[in-house]
Image (tube, rainbow, N blue to C red):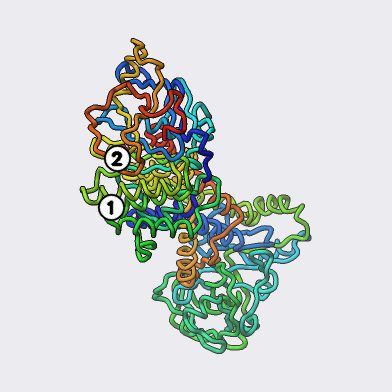
Amino acid sequence: MSTDPNIPALELKNLRFSWPGSAGFSLHIPELRLMPGQHLFIRGASGSGKTTLLNILSGIQTLNEGEVIIAGETLQPQSGSRRDAIRAEKIGVVFQQLNLIPYLSILDNVRLAGAFSGKPLPTDARIAYLLNALGLSQDLWHGFATQLSVGQQQRVAIARALAQQPTLLIADEPTSALDADNRDSFMRLLLAEATAAGTTVIFVSHDPHLAAYFSWQLDMASLAAGIQARATPNSGSGKFNAEPTTTANSTPCDTNLSEVKPIALQPTNSPENGDPSLC
Amino acid sequence: MLIKLARLSLWHRKGTVILTLCSLVISIGLLLGIDHLRLEAKQSFTSTVAGTDLIVGARSGQLNLLLYTVFRIGNATNNISYQHYQQISQHRAVAWSIPLALGDSHKGFRVLGTNPDYFKFFKYGAQQPLVFAKGQAFADVYQTVLGAEVAKKLAYQVGDEITLSHGVGAVSFSEHRGHPFTVVGILAPTGTPVDQSVHVSLLGIEAIHQGWQNGMPSQRLAAKQLSAEQLAALQPSQITGFMLGLKSKAVTFALQRQINEFKAEPLTAILPGAALAEMWQMLSFVENMLLVVTALVLLATLVGLMTTLLAAMKERQRELAILRALGARPWQVFCLIELEVLLTTLLAIVLALLKLSVALFVLKPWLSSSYGLVISVTPWHEHTLLLLSALLGFALILGAIPAYLAYRQSLSQGLVVRI
């Protein structure tokens, strides 16, 4: 998918969400903007609302208030059917594990990417390119997902998520079932392929070590702090942008994540309005 | 793609799916089989006699009269005088008449004493006349015409000689040994009790009972074949009943009334169509019970199908979450489950039809020989499509429960799986 580099891949405006009848968890993001190709790491402990945020970003969970815009197209507020269509067309998702439909072949699992978008299915050439690039040998393609190792399954999941060249790739702890070696190669492949496809990545994990692979990061706690900020507005402009941990996109850096500030999410090297140059 | 998903998903769970399919095939086969047999039996039953306007016998109930004259079941309460038969058959409204004399048998098959008019006027099914497969009607006292099933089962050919037994049991202690009959004709199959009958002339019946008194043979006379003079002097004295064809249907009720009020002898005249309908109505109770039981079996199977789907829902949460993540609408998830129900039920219907056809093909000769039931091998009737559509609709309604749960689940849980 060709993406206009001047249009943000993801824009959140005054996003508010809380579970009905629940006084506990709620989410408030005054503003967040990700430009095409930007890779954002969101860190958060279990129960911090990561999955709720991902459900909102993918249009499955409806908002109480605010807007979610994907590549210039409003995802929320929209009808459920329209949100599903936008998700099919513009968003790729990689889960923690068990990403594949067990009764479909590897090829069919990847083909499934276009099944609900109303667009032509990904071409065989595109699928072959992705599977090859992700190091899955051709003799595996016609086998079932259950015959693959977890690492291989996760790579197929990346292939499927990227098959339709989505604007946004959402990854929900995809490395949680991988050992350290596999995790490293998985992260490199994921980000390299996303970079090649020009896809914006939002990667959610509780594992702070993974932040090193990303140039931008956010802490779920900062979003909770956003609520405090709303209660006691002391966050300057009240605008959130991703905080760069490094200027080099694909080079892991030695960022001390413990220093991540909860709210001070102004980009350190960009103008206030989330200019594309911040990427 | 949804169809492919549904197909492969079923194949993936083939263990439980095959079990469900088996029980569906059995119960759908049972439903279609009972429906088919019911209709075929009704068809066979109501077409046993056609074109006959009145059946007359000794004073009795109409079902009893129908049973022994048409179905050769049970016995007459009394005989009627041949003279009175002649008197009624000469009534100006009567077009033709067939006398019927019952009470003897041959190796378990009933013997019917009649006259050659039987082969001319008796009709069954859609006004079909009797047809000779071999030979012709009897013309002599000691000649017989066999029904198709009798000839087939006992391997008789034209020219063979047979003896008759007194009474209607398969084993008789009173054989009419002195009066062998020659087979002169074999009828083509009709699918009616005619196939199970041995036909002889009224004079033949009279001849073998010469010398009998009080239902027992006299040793001196009964064992001997009659001489030409004796045969020439033979006159039928009694018959069991008779069939009448009228010149105009309009006089049927009037003649029935006249016969029922016949002064010289207590007689009963019945309309075969009405009697058949009444008898079928009695049987339809059993038929309805069978249908109800089958419907319940089918319901249990469909509930089983639904339970299987419901049980699989838990393990399919992840699969549904993946589909949702890929942009599947909740209604598409609903449709996927319903498609699985549709595919399973459709496959079960096809297999059930196939199984039933094979079973009917295999059982056809046995049903025909044991019960005289000639049935079609194709279990398909006008309303079968409607029945199967209703069945499919019902399956889809029951399938909507797990489908709705999947729909709700995919709406509320989104990309999360709570295991």
Could you classify mark 1 by the number of other residues whose Cα lies within 10 Å: few (under 14), some (14-19), or many (20 or more)?
Answer: some
Rendered position, B187 above or below A225: below
Rendered position, A65 above or below B385: above
Disc 2 is attached to a residue of which chain?
A
Disc 1 is attached to a residue of which chain?
A
Looking at the image, residue A43 sits to the left or right of residue B182; the answer is left
Residue plotted at (33% across, 10% down):
A232
- Mark 1 and mark 2 on one chain: yes
Residue placed most toward the observer, B265 or B376: B376
- The type of residue carrying mark 2 is Glu
Rendered position, A34 above or below A114: above
Residue B397 visible, this orientation? no
Please state the horizontal and vertical placement of residue A236, each as a whole percent of the image.
Answer: 38, 15
Q: Which numbered circle lies on residue A173? A: 2
Residue placed most toward the observer, A217 or A43: A217
Q: Secondary structure at mark 1?
A: helix
Rendered position, B368 above or below B186: above
Q: Which numbered circle lies on residue A151? A: 1
